[in-house]
Image (spheres, rainbow, N blue to C red):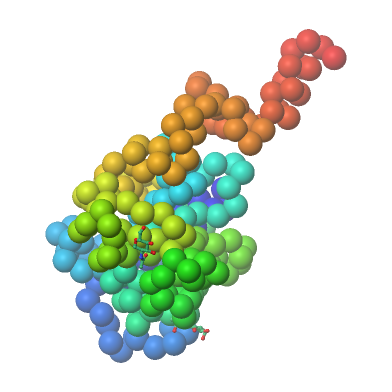
Amino acid sequence: MQLGSLVASLCALSSTVLADADFASVRRRLRKDMSGRKTDPAEKYFHIGVETWLMHGSLLGWWWNKQIMPWDSDIDVQVMEPSMYYLAAYYNMSVFHYKTPRIPEGRDYLLEINPHYHNREQTDLLNAIDARWIDTVTGLFIDITTARYNLSHPAGAGMLSCKDGHEYRDTYLLPLHDTKFEGAPVKIPYRFQDMLESEYGIDALTDKDFHDHTFDDDSMEWVPHMNIQAQERLNHGY
Ligand SMILES: *[C@@H]1O[C@H](CO)[C@@H](O)[C@H](O)[C@H]1NC(C)=O
Ligand SMILES: *[C@@H]1O[C@H](CO)[C@@H](O)[C@H](O)[C@H]1NC(C)=O
């Protein structure tokens, strides 16, 4: 799936920008070949860098079968506020070239940062999405939103707010949990089940009929009802 290779490219971005800032390359419309680049030492991950985790529909897709749900048209990830400032300062409109197993010849991905990223208020609804990671061939993109510490939250310290109105305590998020999505290494919130339940309700985690699809436990896939009906017609010979 096209969106799948987009996930792989985003993972590559995360490990790329973990490196110490390479000031010679900090400029607009930078185009770099990022494939074949060595990954930073694992311990470096915890000092600097852009940690990103799955949220919303992508986290729900992960819950079911570690894949994008067939009816989802985008991918949602989040970063912390300092990471968004870092990306805005050094990587706006940067084009990164990545080779992934699915696209061995490589492809260009553009990172675009919304100029309203520094507006923290939930009233800025039109700009809830702070950045996009865009596949320049297909136009498919990953939405990047920001989790911001909310110092005036009535529930006290440690509350994170997002411009789309979602709020959660940082102990639900951290430490991030390593897993795979569409075959690529990704991170998810520590208490992913609680996060999903509060966003979608408990039924979304158990209900196998959704969006004209049924979840098939054997194949671990969402099967469109259209296909199920066609199969039944075949089985019954009409
Ligand atoms: C990123 O670049 C685009 C295109 O130049 C510009 O419209 C936008 O305001 C920039 N974003 C930031 C955060 O500077
Ligand atoms: C902080 O939390 C309060 C209560 O939920 C909310 O009204 C406010 O918009 C939040 N502030 C920010 C900057 O997100």
User: Which image quadrant is residue 22 in?
Assistant: bottom left
Furthest residue toward front: 154
**Number of callouts:** 0
Q: Position of residue 76 (x, y in %)?
A: 47, 55
Q: Give the answer, above or below, for where 188 lies relative to 221.
A: below
Residue at 50% over, 54% down: 75
Q: Give the answer, above or below, for where 167 lies relative to 67.
A: below
Q: Give the answer, above or below, for where 114 lies relative to 9.
A: below
Ligand 2 found in image quarter: bottom left
**In screen coordinates, is 203 left or right of 172?**
right
Residue at 74% over, 12% down: 235
Looking at the rendered image, the quarter that the C terminus falls into is top right
Furthest residue toward right: 238
Residue at 63% over, 36% down: 211
Furthest residue toward top: 236
Residue 106 visible in the picture: no
Residue at 43% over, 83% down: 30
Q: Position of residue 85 (x, y in %)?
A: 33, 76
In front here: 158 or 54?
Answer: 158
Q: Position of residue 39 (x, y in %)?
A: 26, 62
Residue 199 visible in the picture: yes
Q: Give the answer, above or below, for where 216 lies relative to 204.
A: above
Q: Position of residue 219 (x, y in %)?
A: 52, 25
